[in-house]
Image (cartoon, rainbow, N blue to C red):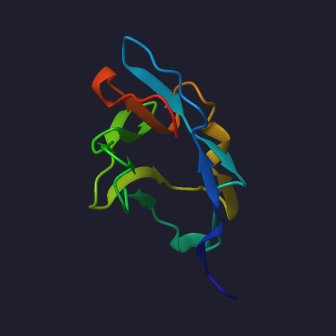
Amino acid sequence: MRLLRNITDRHSKIEFGQVPVSNKCVTKFGQATGNLTVSDTRGSKKDTWTITSREKEVLTSVDNSLAGCLSYQTSGGEILLFESMQIVESVKLEMDSEEVISDDWNGKDHGLKVALPVEKQRIGN
């Protein structure tokens, strides 16, 4: 018997789409292609697992850095993403099963989001 704690599926792309320019901070949640799925088949050896995330490269355009604008939102609060790994999810499954983490990413209050203050907003690509 093989005991596993494994990410069985992951996102290949997260899109924020076009964000309108505004005279106030604009917040947009990312829409993912695919699911972020974790399985745990370790039987009685199950323990809490965590998912970490980081901003590998700062989001930028030609003349604009969006450093500090990317975060992961959970029901417990907001986690700003920088170069170092941050724990964004932590779960212990009671039975051998899968958890589709991205099922909670509803585009309103859970998942990856970008918050663009007025001074970071630009017109164009």
| Towards the viewer: 59 or 45 | 59
Number of numbered tags placed on the structure image = 0
Q: Residue furthest top?
A: 23
Q: Residue furthest bottom?
A: 1
Determine the image quadrant of residue 66.
top left
> With 80 as the anchor, is 74 left or right in this view?
right
Image quarter in which the N terminus is found: bottom right
Asked if residue 2 is positioned above or below residue 120 in the image, the reply reads: below
Q: Residue at x 46, y 59 (%)?
A: 51
> With 9 as the anchor, is 67 left or right in this view?
left
> With 4 as the anchor, is 91 left or right in this view?
left
Q: Residue at x 63, y 46 (%)?
A: 102
Asked if residue 91 is positioned above or below residue 106 in the image, the reply reads: below
Return the x and y of residue 53 as percentages of the image width and height: 41, 57
Q: Residue at x 26, y 61 (%)?
A: 84
Residue 110 shows in the view: yes
| Towards the viewer: 46 or 66 | 66
| Towards the viewer: 49 or 23 | 23
Residue 101 shows in the view: no
Return the x and y of residue 93 as percentages of the image width and height: 58, 56
Determine the image quadrant of residue 103.
top right
Return the x and y of residue 23 as percentages of the image width and height: 38, 11
